Every structure is written in structure tokens, then in C-alpha cells.
Image (cartoon, coloured by chain):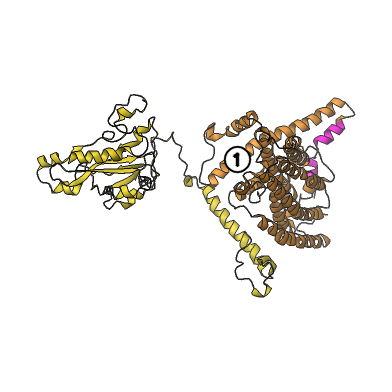
Chain colours: A orange, B yellow
Amino acid sequence: MTGITENIWQAKTVAQRAAEALPESVWFALGYMVLGVVGVAAFIAVLGMGLIYAERKIAGHFQCRLGPMRVGWHGIFQTVADTLKLLLKEDVVPAQADKFLHILAPLFTLLGTILVLAVLPMSPIVHVSDVNIGVVYVGAVSGFGVLGILLGGWSSNNKWSLLGAMRAGAQIISYEISATLALLVVVLFSGTLRLSEIVESQAAGWWIWRAHGVGIVAFLLFFIASLAEINRTPFDIPEGESELTAGFHTEYSGMRFAFFFLAEFINMFIVAALTATLFLGGWMPFHIGDFAGFNAIMDMIPPGLWFTGKTAFLVFLIMWFRWTFPRLRVDQLMRLEWKVLLPIGFANLIAAAVVVLFNFYFFPVR
Amino acid sequence: MMQATDKQENPTRSGLVTAPELKRHGFFRNVFSGIKSLLEGMKVTFHYLSHPSTVVTQQYPENRATLKMMERYRALLTMIHDENGLHKCTGCQICHDNCPNASINVVTRSNPVSGKKELDRYIWRMDSCTFCNLCVQVCPFGVLKMDGSFEGAVYDRRLFVFTLNHYAGPAAGLLAKVADPEERKKMIEPRDRYSGPVPLNGQELAGVKALKKAESGCCGGSGGCCSDSQGSQGSKEMK
Ligand code: SF4
Ligand code: SF4
């Protein structure tokens, strides 16, 4: 089955290229590394601006408004202007704050985001590094985001910030469990922790619909839990404007606020990309079993486009959620996780194990 | 989201925290009703997204020429004058008494011909008005209305206090009963916007001048005192 894809798209990461170039010249290898780093940085900046603009436009229309309209055609340069403003803005650190941690916090949050981006297989060639424990790695480094929030709330020396940070901690510890349980389902199915192999295992069909409903439940669980992990509305209680002013980033301004803000939007992309990778086949085109003709047509669309399309759809879904659902109360949030998602997650994992045991898929893989 | 109806919890388990998730059938019903209501909400917002005609934002000032204000927009209190330039205000002062901010001063006079009490000046203080619409609603004769002309910014605050009626004299209904046009003309005296006991008091306003007590002919537009004292004096003089 993987034969279809193997010869067409030989997956190769930037890290692999660097390793291959090393015997020839150190500078080639270094060049590839710089390419990877600069690529990720540029990607974050451009994507951040694009997503913020898209969110504001879409949010506007969800609420019978227009969104930004003034700067450039239909406000297309609004985010650029905002970025400039944030860059030039005075950076205020409260007098009683723990200055070192205060400065460190947004960097940690952004660091977690960048580290996850590095392992995302966006297309066979656009992939910085392929880690053999990719899934575990993603779960681990995304913890930097929480660390940043906790540090930010703690170091601000502000009750609201602290409350927001504590809420973030409680929320992420809780929802991490559900997200991992849903993730394990895919690991069971594909038998690997490597993200690129998970993508390749979906050559015959995406995991979301190949396992008789188990995949759909896992998809929903993972999506909901991930939304909670990145503090996206309706789970944005760490920020909670109506209760906590701005939660953990109440005391942040200028560049450092921009870091938090950027991380929030890139995280949204990461959640969408990860969900697409795990459940919707990543860059893998839409294939139906052995229908060679149909599959060949689908293969004509480049994998990068498949990835972009799937991710864009999920990002849109996340925005749609944000501008429709009201924020949960703290106790409701905990109840949703511990009493609803967790039992469903366990039951789903057992069901998945049964499916794997009897090899009871549509279009068997192995 | 997840607490659809936990009103009728079973009383036998009182003391325990009751939640629909704990009940045998409640769990899935709760999850599905939650999902259903969320989808319902998403349907509503998607309708807004997919129908740009639902957008209410106005691109003011670009569309200034074509802008049509909403019917219920309240920006400027106006006295309705019919096609003959006549209003229906009787000077009963009900609006004056009902304004919560004392933004209205209805100054009355005795008619020089008939001697009857009637409206002299209807003075409105736009600067203290909250646009609550009470005056429009309490008027028994439907004299007032709220207009949508919202471009009310001015460079001199004296311009915020002005006269709404275009003439001093009896209401349109009473005036119609007077047959002789000569006599009718005698009963009416024109009133412009900034003459009389308003802070501007008929002055020219070339550019923005400082407010001076002596010039303005009253207390200089500070506080709500001016038109009141002036008004009662004015009506005495009329007698
Ligand atoms: S709208 Fe309200 S505040 Fe304004 S003049 Fe009328 S009654 Fe007074
Ligand atoms: S506007 Fe209406 S309520 Fe006010 S004085 Fe005239 S008739 Fe009376």
C-alpha cells in the first residue's frame, strides 16, 4: 500500500539533508540547519500575521461585523501595522515583579511552540526534523507553553495573573490526559511514534474513519482536549477577560505581550496541524483503499496543498468554535474533563485495542 | 454546557453532588444534548458568516452620502413641524417635568392677542441629554421625535443649547381655528435656534470665542440655571 506514495514522494527532512551533507562540507550542513531555523522563524512570523488577520476577519463576519477595513485593501495590512505598534511600544515591567522570570516567561511559551513546529511533517520535503518518538516529544515540549504561562502569572506579582496561571496549570494537567488517551489510539493503530510514519500509515485511508467510529471519537476527544490545552475559547479561563482582566498576561505589554499572542495563534495552527497529521492523514492525499484510478487523481494534488487544506479547515473550525461558544466556568471545565472526556477516552482506548487486536479496519494496513 | 437540566435530581441521594453525568442514562443524553445545542449555535454563527448581508457595520464616513440611519436611532431631539411650519406643542411642560436630567426648558408666554398660555421657547440642552427618549414618550400630543442626525459635534459648547420650535405661538390645532389670517400672523412670532435665553443668545459666532458672562446675557452657559431664570423673566415681560 505504501508503494503508491513511496516512489512519488520520498520523504526527506531538513535534518536528514544536513546529515547527508556533513561528510562533504560542514558549511553545507550548517547551511541546512540555518535554513531550518530561519524557515521556522519566518514561518512563525508570517503565519502569525496571517492567522491574526484571518481570525479578525472571520470573527467580524461571525458577529455581523466587517473586521479590519481601514489599513490597506479590506484591512489587509492591519496586522502589519499592529505588529509595528507592538514592537515600538513601551515595555512595562511592574516594579514588584520578578524581572528575570517576567522576561523569561513569554520566551518559554514561544519556545514550546517552535519546538513542536520543528517536527511537524507539513509535506514530504517541508519537514525540519523527524524524531523517532515524535508523539511523545510533542506532548513533552508543548509543556513549555504551560511553563511560560505559570511563570508569567507567578512573576507578575498580581493576583489576577496568579489566578490565571493556576487555572492554566489545572486545566492543562487535566486535559493532557484526554489528549494523550486519544493520541494513544492513533499510536495503537499505526504502531509507531514517529509522526512521518503515522502519516504514511494512512496511505489507504485516514484514521478518523477507518476504525468504525473509534477514530471519530478519538478525533473529537483530541481536538477538544487540545483546544483546552492551548487555552483557546471556550476554554480560555486562564485569560478570562471578564473575570481576570487578562489573566496571566495582565502585566505584559509591548513585545512580550506580542510573544504570548503570537504563541497563542501559532499554537492554534499546531493543534490543527497535529490533528490533521494524526487523524486526517497529514499531507497524505485522500485515498480509498485500492481504487487505483481515484487514488491517482488525488495524488495529482501536491501533498503540501493537502496538508494546508486540512489544517486550514481545522483552523477555521477552531475559530468557529471561538466565536460561537461561551466560555466555561472553572468547575464546568473540570467536570467536562474528569466526568465526560476521561471515561469516554478510556472506553475508546479499549475499543481501539480490540480493533487493533482483530485487525478490524476498513482497508487493512499490514 | 454540560448541565442541561439538573433541577429534578432524585431526592434519595441528597447530600451527594448531583450531576447528570452521574446518572445511568443521563451521561449520554447529556453529551448528545450538549453536542446538539453546540451545533445549533454554530449553525447560527455560520449563517452570519455566509451571509454578508447580515453585516451591520457602516463604512462611515466613506458612505456618508448614502448612509441611512436606523429608524430607532436617537441622536437629535426635534420638534415636528408640519408642511405649514406649524407644531403641535401646547407648552404643557410635561416633558420638562419628566426629563431626568432637566435638559428641557419649556418657556411659556401669554398670547398677545388671545392672552392664552402657549409655547414661547422650547429649549433643549443637548450636552446634558442622555437620549433616553422619555420626553418623546410622555408628550401627550406627539410633538417630539428623535432624529437620526448624529453629527452633533461642535466647537463651542454654547451651541449645544438651543431652541427647537420655529415660532412662538399657539399649537397648530388652535391656530387653525383662527379664521382671520391677519390675526393669525399677529399671534405668531418667529423664533430662531440661538436667539433668546440660550447661552449663545443671538450672538454671531465667528470662530470660537471665549464665553463671557456679560456678553451671553445670562450665566454664560454654565450649569442649567440660565434659561430658567431668563425664561420666567421673559414670560413675565410678555404679560
Ligand atoms: S431624551 Fe431624556 S434626557 Fe434627553 S431631553 Fe428627553 S427626557 Fe431629557
Ligand atoms: S412637547 Fe409635548 S409635553 Fe412638551 S410641552 Fe410641548 S406638548 Fe407638552
Q: Is residue A290 visible?
A: no
The answer to which image quadrant residue A80 occupies is top right
The spot of residue A15 in percent (x, y) is 83, 35
Residue at point 17% right, 40% down? B188
Q: Main secondary structure of the magenta part?
A: helix
Residue A38 is covered by the magenta coloring: no
The answer to which image quadrant residue B24 occupies is bottom right
Segment tinted magenta in the rendering: A4-20
Residue A185, compared with residue B60, is above or below; it is below
The answer to which image quadrant residue B202 occupies is top left
Residue at point 55% right, 34% down? A75
Q: Is residue B54 visible?
A: yes
Which secondary structure lies at badge 1? helix
Name, please, the residue furthest toward the bottom: B12
In this rendered view, identify the residue nearer to me: B101 or A347: B101
Going by the image, does A156 lie left or right of A66?
A: right
Residue corresponding to mark 1? A54
In this rendered view, identify the residue nearer to me: B107 or A108: B107
